[in-house]
Image (cartoon, rainbow, N blue to C red):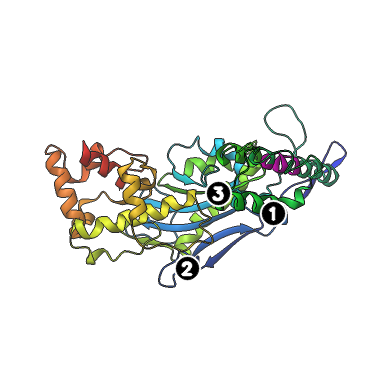
Amino acid sequence: MTTVHNNSREVKPDWSSVIVEEEQMPWSQNGAKTICARYKDPVLRGYSAVIVKDSINREFSENENLITPDRVTTMIVRFPRFILPEWNTHRVFSRNSASSRARSIKTTVKPVMKQPVIPLWTINHKGMTGPFADSERAKRSTANWLHSRDEAVLGMFRQLMNEETVPYDAEASDWEKFADKYDEAYKNDVVPASWNDAHKQDCNRLIEPWMWHETLVTSTYWQNFLDLRIAAGVQPEMEATAILIKAVLEASPKYGTLKKRVLHVPFIEVEENDLLSWESLEPVLLQSASECARISYHDRSTMKNRNGSNLGKRLLAEKHMSPFEHIAWSAKSGDWKKVPALKERMTDLLEKHPDCPPDKITGSLTSNLSESWLQFRRVIENREQ
C-alpha cells in the first residue's frame, strides 16, 4: 500500500497481512494447539503473538466481545527490543522477559546477525512521528543500520576479549569464530590475562537496538492498550505489536483456545477436580512459575517444558516474585469452592480477614488483575504477612 508524500512514494507496512494459525508449540501438552499471529508482509517479519493460556470465569458466547476483565490471558509477544520502554509503561501487564544479562553471548548475537530488527523507517517530521519513507530512503537507511550493527557486534567482542583477538579490520561475518573462541576459553578456564574480560551483562547492551525481544505477558485489561497503540501517531513498531495482540485475542474464542476455567496456570494443563488439597496443587503452581521464568534464559518458541518446580522454589525463596503474577484463579466463591485445593487455601485467607465477604476477598489481594481473578503472587504475599 502506498501514498504520495512530498513528491515521493510513502511505503507503508501492510497491517492487513496478519496471519492467524493454530500451531503446536514445543511447550504444548497432550498434543494441544494454540493460536499464533504473524505477518505475511516481509517488512513485518519477526513480530509475533502466541497464546499460552486463555481463561474466562463465566459462560460465554464466541460471538460476543470478549475483551473483558472477566478474562485473563497469557501470551508470548515478540517485538523490537528498542520499544521495550514504551511497553513497560503499561502497568496492568504482568511480564517476564528475555534478559540481555542472562542469555549467552552466542544466543544473543546469532539473531542479531541472522535476522536483525530493521526499523519501519519514517521521514523526519515535526512532532513524534513522520510519514513512512519511500523505498529508496528505506533501502539506504537499512544499509547504514546494518553497517552500524556490524560495528556494534565487533565492538562487543572487543570488550569481551581485546583488540588483538578482534582487530579493527575484522569482519562481522566472522562473529561465530569469535563467539566460539570466547566460549572455548571460558569452558576450559584458559581466559588470557590480556583480555578485557567484561561481563556479558555489559557487553550485550551494545547490540540491543538490533535485538528482537520476547516477553511473557498476562493481563485482564487489554482494551486500553489496544485503543492507545492502534491509533494515529503511534510508533509503527508498537502498532505492529498491538495489531497482533488484538488478532490473537479475537481469534482465541473462535478456535477454542479460550476456555472457561477456575485455575489459570500457564504452560501446565491442570485437571481441577483432581486437586484435592493445597499440598497437591502448590507444586503444580511452582512448576508453572518455573516455566514462566525460563523466558529470561531461553527462547520459549523452541523450548519444551522441563519437569519439576525447583526453579520456582528457588525464585520464591529469593523473593523473585514476578513469575508468580501469571498464575491466577477465579475470585468467585462459587468457582473456587468447587476445587478442594483452592477451597482449603481460600478458607485460610478468609480466616485472616473475617470481615471480608467471600466474593470481596480481592479487596485484600489487590493486584494488576481485575477483581474477577486472584493473583498467586498476592496470595503468597498475603499468607506471609
Report the side of 237 relative to 357 (left or right): right
- Would you place residue 279 above or below residue 130 in this image? below
Residue 294, label in figure? none
Look at the numbered discs 1 and 3 and tell me whether their residues touch, using CB distance below 8 Å: no
Q: Secondary structure at mark 1?
A: helix
Residue 266 appears in the rendering: yes
Of the numbered discs 1 and 3, the one sitting upstream in the chain is 1
Q: CA distance from mark 2 to mark 1?
A: 35 Å
The amino acid at mark 1 is Glu
* Circle 3 Cα neighbour tier, 10 Å, few/some/many (<14 / 14–19 / ≥20): few
Quick one: 80 or 122, which is closer to the camera? 80
Q: Secondary structure at mark 2?
A: loop
x 41%, y 58%: residue: 53
- Main secondary structure type of the part rendered in magenta: helix
Q: CA distance from mark 1 to mark 3?
A: 20 Å
| Residue that carries the numbered disc 3 in the rendered image | 189
Quick one: 27 or 17, which is closer to the camera? 27
| Residue that carries the numbered disc 2 in the rendered image | 33
The amino acid at mark 3 is Asp
Report the side of 169 relative to 222 (left or right): right
Residue 176, label in figure? 1
Q: Is residue 173 magenta?
A: no
Q: CA distance from mark 2 to mark 3?
A: 44 Å
Residue bounds of the magenta highlight: 150-157
Q: Secondary structure at mark 3?
A: loop
Look at the numbered discs 2 and 1 and tell me whether their residues touch, using CB distance below 8 Å: no
